[in-house]
Image: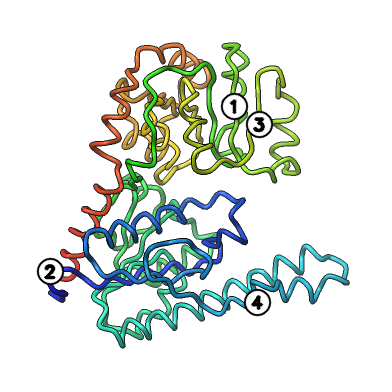
Amino acid sequence: MPKLKNNKLKILILAPVIYMSPTKFGDKIYAPRDYILTLAEGLKKKGHEVILFSTPDLKTEVPLMGGDWYPLKHDLIRDRYKTRELISEYWMQSRTLVQDYYEADIIVKAIKYANENQVDIIHTDSYLVHFFQSLTEIPIIYLMHDPLPTDEAIEYWILKRFKDHKYISISNSQRRSGDLHINFIDTVYHGLPLENFIFNPKRGESLAFVGRVIKEKGLDKAIEVSKKLNIPLKLATTNDYKDSQYYQEEIAPIIDKRLVQTMGFLVGKEKIEFYNKAMALLFPISWSEPFGLVMIEAMACGTPVVAFDCGSVKEVVKDGVTGYVVDPREGITGFIEAVKKIDLIDRVKCREYFETHFTAEIMVNNYEKLYSKVLQK
């Protein structure tokens, strides 16, 4: 097994997606950004030598290397088309080209670096890396963030072509989210830095919803719960949703401004305070959620979760202890009944469950075991 002194590894984390950029996309919900930084810095604290290849504007204590940032920094292609009609269409096409350009550039640089600097293992979450794996003999493991795609998506055909590569799932349910069979070698749950989350033992007076305003996340159901129970609902999300068809057709007509308050996109201390002041996080999803980071964020603050039993929910929420897992067949009626019982949930137990299952330290330890298993073969 390759090793550095004292059995420590040289690990290259490759996160080439442009949405990692906090300056370009910091106002967008992109959960992998926090996950990558937490993992990289956690591994470094354990004594491993970690090199992160990603966007150059990230703030991290880990040595950071970026790709050719010029086209993104200066929005070259958008400027090129700004005088033409159908600007948005050209921009969407060109943004894809810029993304592919940046990812391909940084992937080649990362693999070249790994080959020349005796890296032990490469950890990535990029589909594009599959096409470059033949350039190195260093083991590469691929983290899956999303449910398994259907054959209508290009990702399906990429995964099918490279089905024997080494994949990590973030929940066991993620492996069952489609009919595609790929080489999952382990499941590692996400974790969060314990010290970043302040515990509040006192129940708040409002319900909380955190996430994108899309049908699969179930904001319409959260609003219905709020209205039927006459309990305020506070919404934390990005500010770019009001033009969406879902919002216009299903959310705007039912919003009761007396009860529903939009807080905007929250990060850091503001987000922690948001969870601390909530009596419960509502998670009325209707899709195969691969993990659901907001659930463990809430539990870290002592806030219980009420969620429909879809995707990973049953693996994250301990029914009757850290909240309630509602059978989707019970519909909104079952969800409301669960919220009515929220006072039976001990907020201390929520925090304790987070501490024993979903901290960054636990996640990092599990990745250490995974790396060792891969390198021993």
Quick one: which residue is furthest to the bottom in this view?
116
Crowding at dot 1, Cα within 10 Å, few <14 / some 14-19 / many 20+, comes out as many
Count all numbered tags in the image, as a single digit: 4
Q: Compare residues 128 and 366 and report the one nearer the observer.
A: 366
Q: Position of residue 322 (x, y in %)?
A: 33, 25
Q: Given contact means CB atoms under 8 Å apart, are the residues at marks 3 and 1 in contact?
A: yes
The quarter of the picture where the C terminus appears is bottom left
Residue matched to label 3: 262
Q: Position of residue 165 (x, y in %)?
A: 31, 70
**Looking at the rendering, which quadrant does residue 263 occupy?**
top right
Q: Which element type, helix, strand or loop, lies under badge 1?
A: strand
Residue matched to label 4: 71
> Residue shown at 33%/36% (left/top)?
316
> Residue shown at 33%/72% (left/top)?
12
Q: CA distance from mark 3 to mark 1?
A: 6 Å
Query: The disc labelled 4 sits on which kind of residue?
Result: Pro
Q: Which element type, helix, strand or loop, lies under badge 3?
A: strand
**First of labels 4, 1 by sequence position:** 4
Residue matched to label 2: 7
The quarter of the picture where the N terminus appears is bottom left
Query: The disc labelled 3 sits on which kind of residue?
Result: Thr
Q: Position of residue 180 (x, y in %)?
A: 39, 58
> Residue shown at 60%/51% (left/top)?
28
Q: Position of residue 160 (x, y in %)?
A: 40, 67
Q: CA distance from mark 2 to mark 3?
A: 49 Å
Q: Which mark is residue 234?
A: 1
Query: The disc labelled 1 sits on which kind of residue?
Result: Lys
Q: Compare residues 169 and 71 and report the one nearer the observer.
A: 71
